[in-house]
Amino acid sequence: MANVSVYNMEGKEVGTMELNDAVFGVEINDHLVHLAVVRQLANKRQGTQKAKTRSEVSGGGRKPWRQKGTGHARQGSTRSPQWTGGGVVFAPVPRDYEIKMNKKERRAALKSALTSRVQENKLIVLDDLKLDEVKTKAMQAVLNNLNVSKAMVVLADNDQNVVLSARNIPDVITALPNTINVYDVLKYNTVILTKSAVASIEEVYA
């Protein structure tokens, strides 16, 4: 099992903690991690883009001029793609961008992402994270003490004082053990976990 230091909110080391290798010490599968990121970004897409083809735009019922003898190129409709107001060639239509991944693959990808954070020393365990009131400055002070900026903070429970205090800090998000995902784990420079959040993650994924 990997040993990591545990810090308090002042940034001082207060002990160590053993992380479960079944979650934080697996063999990293880069392919699954890539698939998970692509899947998440694809599933975010709305897929509502739409343009009209020549069969859908209004007008253009009759041939604009006779076939021969005018000096113009032959035309069959004023709603052909080359005309102003004409339809779009191969117009986009609403579609579903969803990519499927089975549960076993998703779990393996998340474990790989968490393991990579441990190996790169970009995972910090906090003894506890409690704020007396909603105050952005107090949350920023905790991050400054830990010497981190772009961070993902994982809490064991939905502590509104912490969640609301972190909300206005750029490049900082909060998450719960059941909402963490591969993309966010990799996107943020540092993953900050409370000891209770580590226990919850190990309980679910080990």
Image (tube, rainbow, N blue to C red):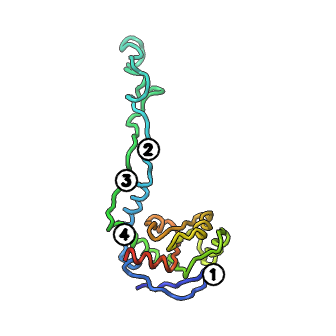
Of residues 89 and 11, the one nearer the viewer is 11
CA distance for labels 1 and 2: 48 Å
Query: What residue is pinned by disc 3?
Result: 98
Q: In which quarter of the image is the C terminus?
A: bottom left
Residue found at x 41% / y 62%:
37
Type of amino acid at the residue the image marks with label 2: Thr
Q: In the picture shown, does residue 68 fall above or below 181?
A: above
Location of the N terminus (image quadrant): bottom left
| Viewer-proximal residue among 159 and 112 | 159
Residue at image point 50% right, 76% down: 123
Which residue type carries mark 4? Arg
For mark 1, what is the residue? 10
Q: Which residue is drawn at 64% across and 68% down?
A: 134
Classed neighbour count for the residue bearing mark 2: other residues with Cα under 10 Å, few (<14), some (14–19), many (≥20): few
Q: Which of marks 2 and 4 is nearer the N terminus?
A: 2
Distance from the alpha carbon under mark 4 to that under mark 3? 18 Å
Q: Name the residue under label 2.
A: 48
Q: Which of marks 3 and 1 is nearer the N terminus?
A: 1
Q: How far apart are marks 4 and 1 (CA)?
A: 33 Å
Closest to the observer: 141 or 120? 141
Tell me, for residue 90, which label it has, or none. none
Tell me, yes or no, whether the two marked residues, 4 and 3, touch with CB atoms within 8 Å. no
Contact (Cβ within 8 Å) of mark 4 with mark 1: no
Q: How many marks?
A: 4
Q: Residue 107 carries which label?
A: 4
Give the amino acid type for the residue marked by disc 3 in the picture.
Answer: Glu
Badge 1 marks a residue whose secondary structure is: loop
Q: Earlier in the sequence, mark 1 or mark 2?
A: 1
